Image (cartoon, rainbow, N blue to C red):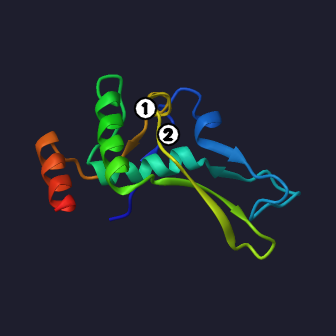
Amino acid sequence: MPLTYNFTKIENYEQICTRKLVEGDKGFNPKEDLFRTTPLAESLVWMSMFIGMREITEKNWEQFYWRTRLLEVTTGAYRQMGTYDDDDKIIAREEQFFTKEEIKSMIGLSTNASEMTKAEFYKNKIKDLI
């Protein structure tokens, strides 16, 4: 089953979740207004699957953050920015860890990811570490 998501309940989702392609971006076409999902939005969609939470709400955003933080501290950042040479080969990579403010700004995100209880999540992460 494909991972699906909905950004429309996020306040200011057009600014937070999408960006207009500009000259130099892959897929840029000066004759069309094309948009891409922002790295923040895209990576949190995938993160919802890894941490077993299908939405970010006013009630659960802190739990979403702490599960994300535990995963990143133990396995590394899931979002990275790169610098590329003229041949499109990466020459430098910088990890970007999620902040509380970023998670909170995404309240309203929903996906169809499978859910895990707190106990299931921590049990799975302990297994991954051993």
Q: Quadrant of the C terminus?
A: bottom left
Residue 60: give x, y in percent of width and height: 29, 29
Amino acid type at circle 1 is: Gly
Residue under label 1, please give it: 108
Identified at 65% across, 62% down, the residue is 92
Give the image location of residue 105, x and y in percent.
50, 29
From this view, report whether residue 109 is shown above or below residue 59.
below
**Drawn side of residue 19 relative to residue 30, left or right:** left
The tag earlier along the polypeptide, 1 or 2, is 2
- 48 or 74: nearer the eye? 74
Q: Could you tell me which residue is drawn at 81 percent across and 52 percent down? A: 22
Number of other residues with Cα within 10 Å of mark 2, as a class: few under 14, some 14 to 19, many 20 or more: many
Badge 1 marks a residue whose secondary structure is: loop
Give the residue displayed 37% in from the left and 34% down from the top.
56
Q: Horizontal and vertical percent for residue 3?
A: 38, 58
Disc ID at residue 7: 2
Q: Residue at x 44, y 46 (%)?
A: 44
The spot of residue 25 in percent (x, y) is 77, 59
Q: Could you tell me if residue 112 is visible in this image? A: no
Q: Nearer the viewer, residue 21 or 86?
A: 86
Query: How far, Cα to Cα, is label 1 from label 2?
Result: 7 Å
- Horizontal side, residue 111 vs residue 94: left or right: left
Q: Quadrant of residue 66?
A: top left
The type of residue carrying mark 2 is: Phe
Question: Secondary structure under badge 2?
Answer: loop
| Image-quadrant location for residue 110 | top left
* Residue 72 seen from this side: yes
Q: Quadrant of the N terminus?
A: bottom left
Q: Are marks 1 and 2 in contact (CB under 8 Å)?
A: yes
